[in-house]
Image: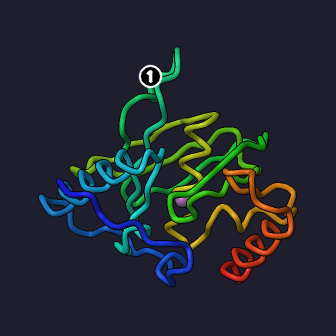
Amino acid sequence: MAVRKILYASDPKLRQKAKKVKVFGPQLKKLANDMIETMHEANGVGLAGPQIGVMQRIFVAEIPEEEDNPLSGKPWVMINPEIVKRTVEMEEGQEGCLSIPGWVGLVNRHYGVEIKARTVSGKPIKMKVTGFLARVFQHEYDHLDGILFVDHISDPEKLWRLDAEEEDDDDVYVFEEIESLTA
Ligand code: NI
């Protein structure tokens, strides 16, 4: 296993649509393991192929263990995922991104989704997820289509730096910088 380099949001690869995975085999398993290791090393809860420059429809996700949630506390590898159902109910929650280090924002997402995908061995799976894991799945799924969480935020008040010691003006300036990436 190896830790891969995570691309910053300004990299054009993060704005491209990833292609479907066609070959399931040892290479794909190695990629999935590298992605899990990279996500763990960066203390992230998800990582998508394009974030390490791999333009394939694959993401990994793992949320901290939650009581009564058997889907939490373990890594998920989703290949060629498709969100097939979305709850009407939306929920606003905090998000960050390993490609936009130091920034957090409030993003409105579907409270629950049903997702179809293949496992790393090519087995079809279907999962119903809600809450934080559903949020992470939607965020990672977006990466496969070149969408970043900041694209969902239009109110600058809903995006801020993790270290709150910056001047307000500075924050607005950097927000504009991020905005320019989303064009
Ligand atoms: Ni992200």
| Residue 126 position in % (x across, y down) | 44, 41
Residue identifier under label 1: 70
| Residue 181 position in % (x across, y down) | 66, 80
Badge 1: few (under 14), some or many (20 or more) residues near its Cα, within 10 Å?
Answer: few
Element assignment for label 1:
loop
| Residue 2 position in % (x across, y down) | 20, 57
Residue drawn at the location 56% of the way across and 53% of the way down: 83
Quarter of the render that holds ligand 1: bottom right
Q: Amino acid at mark 1?
A: Pro
Residue 79 picture quarter: bottom left
Residue drawn at the location 50% of the way across and 56% of the way down: 82
| Residue 66 position in % (x across, y down) | 52, 22
Residue 31 picture quarter: bottom left
Q: Is residue 86 left or right of residue 8?
A: right
Residue drawn at the location 78% of the way across and 77% of the way down: 176
Relative height, residue 89 to residue 22 (above, below): above
Please identify the quadrant where the C terminus is shown: bottom right
